[in-house]
Amino acid sequence: MSVLLRPGRAFYRILVDYCNSASLAGIGYVVNRRYHWTERLFWLVCLLVAWFFAVRLILAYMHLFRTDVISIAVENVDTRVEPVVFPAVGVCEMGYVKQIYPQMEKFIETLRKSEDMEYNYDVEDFVLRVVYPNLYNVGAFTSYCVPYDDCDECMKCPKDGYYSIAMQIRANCSQLFHECLWNGKPFDCCRYFVPIGTTDGTCFLLNSIQTVEKYGDRWLRLEMDSENPDGDLLLVYNYAASTHIMNEDDIPHILLDRLRFNQISPGYEEKIYITLQNIVNDPLVRSVDIDVRRCLFPDEVHLASRNTNYRKYSYSICATECLKAIQVKLCNCFHPYMLMTGNSNSTACNYTGMQCLDNQNLIAPETRILQPWYTKRFSCQCYPSCMENEIRVVGRHTYDNDYDERSVKLKLMIHPTQRYRRQIVRESLDVVVSIGGILGLFTGASILSIVEFFYFFTVRFISYTAFGEVSETETDENESSSEDEHEERNTYSDIS
């Protein structure tokens, strides 16, 4: 019992001593017995009110710090110092019903079971719609194939291997591109346009961090400055194609067609005039939670909600993986469009799976699945990229000529003189200063108050517990304090 009594008495003495000499405002009046109980009660109420408002203000500030810490401002750009970089470009081959595909005819011929079997144009239309997303229409797989399922002498639709069929029929880079020029100077198209799998099939990307290392051997420096202000990119195609103007971390997507331009018929020539406004991020933006800044950096692909085989994160990558995940969830397979090079095609859809995707309207679904507020059935909750620049089309002209090729010319009209900057308005040091100011205003606390607290309840507590003796100075102070208290009580009794 005596073992517990000594620490208890020591703790009580330390507590009283701390309250009498603490630097916190008002706490000494509450425990000092020299004052009347009404005065002590008054100071206790004042202390509780002050601490209440201090805690409320601190909680409100911390909530504001967690939810409203990012600001996007506009700043000027000195184009004499910083070069302007032309955006990335994606090219996807498109299907054209008036175009002859020799490789497809050869493949259709392999479906003959006998020499007497007639060429089936419905099967050809089916294969076209499997290989080229732009030709797909809802119900195609049932309308073209089902009528021949029970016919032994009829050519039937292929039941599997759609990715291999697409690779056999679709044009490769050298077949698709006729010529590429930057500011009138030709460059090797197939060296810089690198293939990648997308929801539009295999596409070729120029200056995309999804396919090549930035500023590496296969990165074409499309830069402009005050001495070289021109920014004209001319692409000439042998086959129908779609041109996508993108950020360097994006890929073409079947549902994202705002900056998609189709060159389909032979002799089609198009000129597109664009403007560009970049966005930069302060280094401290990365320290903010993703749910607060509401964007992801390209190298934060591991933080995305879904696993991915792509190298970097972007909104289009997230939308692609989201659509792929929905297809797998409902039909246990995904469309062969999204097969990445080198991946096994064990989960790519066969004919039964393609029918399921067709019936579920998941090959070219409604764009509202990309809306974050869409809650019915399935939706894609994707954050934009923190590096996403603003690209606008300010003019577009089309022409027809007598050539068989299709061409598109992309021109950056005006060098950007302003850009966006994403920055944080409250840093960790601001939190310390603000909380310290609130505590100092309402309670008189400082950094030394923390040192004082730990000193009393560690060093002095151990000293009192170990030695159990009170110094002569402390005894004299206690005696004088008792005498003052006795005199004050006599004064109060005389007044009353």
Image (cartoon, rainbow, N blue to C red):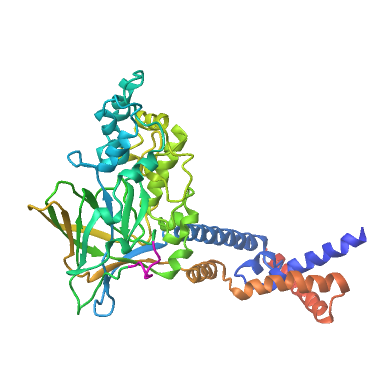
Q: Quadrant of residue 81?
A: bottom left
Q: Is residue 153 left or right of residue 463?
A: left
Q: Residue at x 78, y 73 (%)?
A: 460
Of 439 and 182, nearer the camera is 182
Of 139 and 52, nearer the camera is 139
Q: Is residue 395 left or right of residue 56?
A: left
Q: Quadrant of residue 37?
A: bottom right
Question: How far from the left and from the top, in percent, is residue 226?
Answer: 20, 78
Question: How far from the left and from the top, in percent, is residue 331?
Answer: 44, 32
Q: Is residue 394 above or below residue 346?
A: below
User: The magenta stretch spans which residues?
Assistant: 212-219
Of 210 and 471, nearer the camera is 210
Q: Is residue 472 above or below residue 202?
A: below
Q: Is residue 221 above or below residue 158?
A: below
Of 488 and 58, nearer the camera is 58
* In magenta segment, residue 388: no
Residue farthest along the right direction in this orientation = 2
Q: Is residue 294 left or right of residue 410?
A: right
* In magenta segment, residue 215: yes
Q: Quadrant of residue 446?
A: bottom right
Question: How far from the left and from the top, in percent, is residue 41?
Answer: 63, 59
- Total label count? 0
**Do we see residue 17 in this rendering?**
no
**Do we see residue 189 in this rendering?**
yes
Most common SS among magenta residues: loop
Question: How far from the left and from the top, in percent, is residue 332?
Answer: 47, 34
Quadrant where the C terminus is found in the figure? bottom right
Quadrant where the N terminus is found in the figure? bottom right
